[in-house]
């Protein structure tokens, strides 16, 4: 609950509500670790925020296809 999105949304009067996520995985597969605080993603996130908008508009749709 201490993510950037959480802090951003706390600025407005609202009510917290738990969200439940369900995954259907093939047998033997593990849940993906998609936490943006994961060091694995931090460099990619920092790089993405520095790219020009024209580049992200071209590359973004290609990347989003591969995100589970």
Image: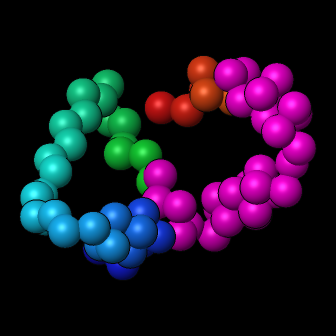
- Name the residue: 63% across, 69% down: 39
> Which residues fall within the magenta stretch?
34-62
Q: Is residue 55 above or below residue 31?
A: above
Residue 5 at x, y percent in the picture = 42, 63
Q: Is residue 25 above or below residue 35?
A: above
Residue 27 at x, y percent in the picture = 28, 29
Residue 36 at x, y percent in the picture = 53, 61
Q: Nearer the viewer, residue 25 or 9?
A: 9
The reply, left or right, for residue 20 in relation to residue 12 is left
Q: Is residue 39 above or below residue 63?
A: below
Locate the N terminus and report the quarter of the image it occupies.
Answer: bottom left
- Name the residue: 16% across, 64% down: 14
Residue 25 belongs to magenta span: no
Q: Looking at the rendering, which quadrant does residue 58 occupy?
A: top right
- Name the residue: 77% across, 27% down: 57
Residue 18 at x, y percent in the picture = 12, 58
Q: Can you see residue 33?
A: yes
- Name the residue: 33% across, 73% down: 11
């Amino acid at each position: 609950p201490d993510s950037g999105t959480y802090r951003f949304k706390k600025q407005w009067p609202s009510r917290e509500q738990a969200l439940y996520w369900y995954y259907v995985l093939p047998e033997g597969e593990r849940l993906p670790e998609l936490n943006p605080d994961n060091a694995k993603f931090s460099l990619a996130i920092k790089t993405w925020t520095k790219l020009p908008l024209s580049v992200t508009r071209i590359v973004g749709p290609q990347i989003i296809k591969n995100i589970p």
